Amino acid sequence: MKIGNIELGEHPVFLAPMEDVTDIGFRLLCKRFGASMVYTEFVSAEALVRDVKSTVQKLTIADEERPVGIQIYGRDVDAMVEAAKIVEQARPDVIDLNFGCPVKKVAGKGAGAGMLQNIPKMLEITRKVVDAVKLPVTAKTRLGWNAEQLIITELAEQLQDCGIQALTIHGRTRSQMYTGEADWTLIGEVKKNPRIHIPIIGNGDIKSLEDADRAFNTYGVDAVMIGRATFGCPWIFSRKELTLDEKIDVLEEQLRINVERIDEYRGILHTRRHLAASPVFKGIPNFRQTRIAMLRAETVESLVGILEKCREELRG
């Protein structure tokens, strides 16, 4: 599979762009464990144009994580075009357009999945961004706004006609948010459409590489993207089973990378969210109090201390 000139191999598995999740430390680890492509946290076009420091910092990428995509969202055509030009200067391999985020602060303002209620503007943004930059432009969206508006089959053709070089489809509507089950049948229909010649990337409810294998075999997608199942679990992309000690070592390394590459405060803030969600600690009795302690930790020393205590408890 290729996006533009980027060779991604057969049956590639991607790390989805997620706010406050796909920071640089996490991306580097996911890449090490086998992610074929990773994405930064999605960034607000308006904030980029206004040069908001915390948003601009999200554009920092490392050569070791390539190929890497940067995803932008917004509802204003000019801001999206200007943001795409700013992103291009950060030298990602791909610029992705977010037409799928369902959360209220994004979709409720007409951006992200909110664009599913204004298809003409979605297409105008796509066309103008494609024309404004030299990098491959891709898009990510959902099946439609709700169950009565499952428009993805037609929309995929329209977006392709605007010049995108790949399309990621999350198998839910905006109304579903993250509830219920992802419907992959419509993703498969898009892939089978003889008019579609760009790669189709499937997303939704992929919790393991075995799930990804089933998606490839059943629906014929070109790539699979994993989102929420990666939280605190960068080794999900590896077919090699890690030991408990190896997993905790990885989480401690993630903390160190984030502190070194971002700063201590935000590095800890990002990492402790992963730790609190990691499946590694499910065997600890009364983990709730430990989880609260993780989320309150403010120094590397205290957070590593909690992790080492967890290691001892899990060893029994």
Image (spheres, grey):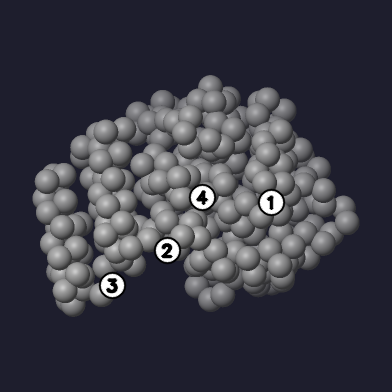
Q: Residue at x 41, y 54 (%)?
A: 234
Residue 49 percent across, percent down from the top left: 48, 27
Say the numbered circle drawn on residue 234. none
Q: Which residue is mark 4?
A: 34
Asked whether, in this view, residue 227 is left or right of residue 266, the answer is right
Instruction: Judge the density around disc 3: few (<14), some (14-19), many (≥20) Cα neighbours within 10 Å.
Output: few
Q: Nearer the viewer, residue 34 or 47?
A: 34
**Which of marks 1 and 2 precedes in the sequence?**
1
Q: CA–CA distance between discs 4 and 1?
A: 13 Å
Q: Residue at x 56, y 37 (%)?
A: 67
Badge 4 amino acid: Gly
- Where 281 sits versus 268, above or below? below
Q: Residue at x 46, y 50 (%)?
A: 33
Q: Which residue is mark 3?
A: 282
Badge 3 amino acid: Lys
Q: Which residue is mark 2?
A: 241
Helix, strand or loop status at disc 4: loop
**Which of marks 3 and 4 precedes in the sequence?**
4
Asked whether, in this view, residue 20 is left or right of residue 157, the answer is left
